[in-house]
Amino acid sequence: MLYLEDPRLPRLAPAQRPLLYTKLERLLLEWLGYTVKLREVGARDLGSEFTRYDQVFARSASIIRNTDLDPAGPLGAEKLRGVIARDFRNRPLATVARYLRAGTLSSQAEAVDLAQRQFISQLDELRRSPLPDGQPFFNSAQARLNSFAHWAVLMEEITEADFVLTNSMIVGADQQMPIYVIARGGLTTGLTDNNDRSPYQTATMVGLFPFLSDAPVFLRERGRIPDAEILDVIATFCLHEMGHFFCRLAEHYDHPNCVHVAPTGLNYYTWHQAVRAAGPCRLVHQITSRF
Ligand SMILES: [Zn+2]
Ligand SMILES: [Zn+2]
């Protein structure tokens, strides 16, 4: 485990992190059958850690440029529309409607229009999430700290840890967004990617801001997570990522109350409650060789 902290953002108390790791170890054993000892190898400043990877990011500059997209930039709206249309093409309209909370949708075109409008407005609101000091979450001078492409490169290259926790989050538009990220306005809560340098061949990050922030967008979409339950809610979400990490499970979309189906919207708390109440899912899960 490597913990990276943005000092501007809310955080877990340092003593809570070992408690979180213990909760996750128990879930890994009871739900996935893995005996795991999670050990923190460092707790560092997020911005400084990204600076240490400057050369790696520079080497991957063209990948980064072709992965992230700016919806407000030249051709941004068309590119975003293309990403959404490509993801929706092979999904039943009923699934799309459920993620967009749209009632009935009459066509793919209507679904893409609606998703694009929802995406832009929620991305804007997420980035403007007020911090305890009154500043907005998103700092354009440090945009890479929230960039999907930078985090994906970091997960592909990192050797100092297998699992990175941060009190920040990935939020923005990128070419690889699946429906649940599109429907959340570009928020990627966790990312498990291939890592050819790792004995596990993979590395994971989880961003804690969506669990720790009580900004209006989170209170409205997620409700308040009781203090006594926050570590359990985060542990359930980490278990979702560990299904990718240890079992190489693909993303699932249609199992009821299954930990291997990512939360719909920002509703992490009720998702956690439903998953825990249902227990381990008995349905067959698809395995993937590459993420
Ligand atoms: Zn997932
Ligand atoms: Zn399942």
Image (spheres, rainbow, N blue to C red):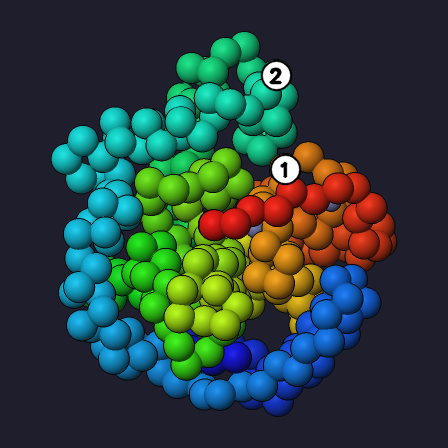
Q: Is residue 245 above or below residue 21?
A: above
Residue 224 seen from this side: no
First of labels 1, 2 by sequence position: 2
Quick one: label 2, few (<14), some, or many (20+) residues within 10 Å?
few
Q: Is residue 257 left or right of residue 131?
A: right
Q: Is residue 220 above or below residue 14?
A: above
User: Is residue 225 or residue 89 the one in the foreground?
Assistant: 89
Q: Residue at x 45, y 88 (%)?
A: 42
Q: Residue at x 63, y 21 (%)?
A: 94
| Numbered tag placed on residue 253 in the rendering | 1
Residue 229 x, y percent position in the rendering: 73, 69
Q: Residue at x 59, y 54 (%)?
A: 248
Q: Is residue 228 left or right of residue 82?
A: right
Residue 163 x, y percent position in the rendering: 51, 72
Q: Is residue 47 above or below residue 252?
A: below
| Numbered tag placed on residue 104 in the rendering | 2
Amino acid at the residue labelled 2 = Thr
